[in-house]
Amino acid sequence: VVTPTLQMKKLKQPSQRMGQKKQRLAEAEQLQSPADAAQTPSPKDPCVEMPAIPGPQRSIYFSSPKGHLTRLGLEFFDQPAVSLARAFLGQVLVRRLANGTELRGRVVETEAYLGPEDEAAHSRGGRQTPRNRGMFMKPGTLYVYIIYGMYFCMNVSSRGDGACVLLRALEPLGGLETMRQLRTTLRKGTTCRALKDRELCSGPSKLCQALAIDKSFDQRDLAQDEAIWLEHGPPGPSEPAVVATARVGVGYSGEWAQKPLRFYLRGSPWVSVVDRVAEQEAQA
């Protein structure tokens, strides 16, 4: 005979065993190591990842959509001719040839041309022609013209209609042998002696020869072109002194011939024409 009390105990046993099993499972889950838990996340929990640490940010000022990370863009060129001529000093001009070779030179000498008021400028009086159209285009546009029927000079337009900067001399940094070959091939009426390094880019036409720049570069955008661009120059131990003196070859322009609108880095052996008087006056 099974008493009612004994029958109730038997009915409770399966329920108690199930409860104990659940308890053991819960205890086992609590003992699971953090590493194991990380490897087997609960499908109900969202996947949370550590935020990525951002790398160094580059200013748009020194960026290009084409991938040249230190390339100078429109913001650099969009300034008055005098300040742009000074800002060019120390920056690096890069020319990529069709075969992929890159020629590099640090700008060490420039001249500013102020536009219609400047009697030495091709845009004097505000005149526009097919030849000088680049001077009236947006800042950073190249204005390349021919002199003596055989040589080229390269200018870069600045802020203001008809204003630009002439690049006069570079310090060669890369591709010197290619520059030498180009200069030897393109120069006229000279002997076949090997050119010294300081002779490669020490003048506006020499610069164009060394970088294979001709009339086809006229009206190109220095901020966007894939064959030529300007890069931010590496910082030096100290800021070099800038000499301001008269421009070269503009004697026809009256008082404008004497205005101190040519700028170069003092002490640079790569400058085309050194003005000792201006240097002494600047030091006084």
Image (cartoon, grey):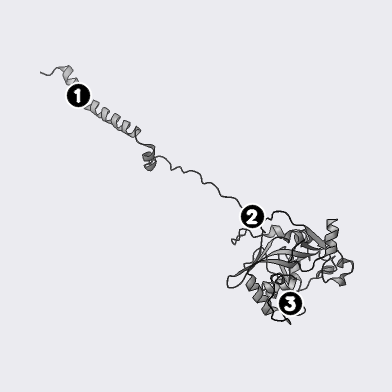
Residue 169 at what x, y percent from top left?
Answer: 73, 67
Task: Give left or right: position of 35 versus 279.
Answer: left
Task: Look at the numbered disc 1 and give the secondary structure of its residue.
Answer: helix
Q: Nearer the viewer, mark 2 or mark 1?
A: 2
Residue 68 at what x, y percent from top left?
Answer: 61, 61
Dot 3 surroundings within 10 Å: few (below 14), some, or many (20 or more)?
some
Could you tell me if residue 31 is visible in this image? Answer: yes
Task: Look at the numbered disc 2 and give the secondary structure of its residue.
Answer: helix
Amino acid found under the numbered disc labelled 1: Leu
Residue linked to disc 3: 151
Q: CA distance from mark 3 to mark 1?
A: 110 Å
Q: Which mark is residue 138?
A: none
Give the position of the N terminus as an image quadrant: top left
Residue linked to disc 1: 11
Front residue (pair 217, 239): 239
**Residue visible at 33% across and 34% down?**
29
Amino acid found under the numbered disc labelled 2: Ile
Dot 2 surroundings within 10 Å: few (below 14), some, or many (20 or more)?
some
Task: Give left or right: position of 191 versus 127.
Answer: left
Front residue (pair 54, 263): 263
Tell me which numbered mark, 3 or 1, is placed earlier along the sequence.
Answer: 1
Amino acid found under the numbered disc labelled 3: Tyr
Q: Quadrant of residue 166?
A: bottom right
Q: Which mark is residue 60?
A: 2
Residue 149 at what x, y percent from top left?
Answer: 76, 80
Tell me which numbered mark, 2 or 3, is placed earlier along the sequence.
Answer: 2
Q: CA distance from mark 2 to mark 3?
A: 36 Å
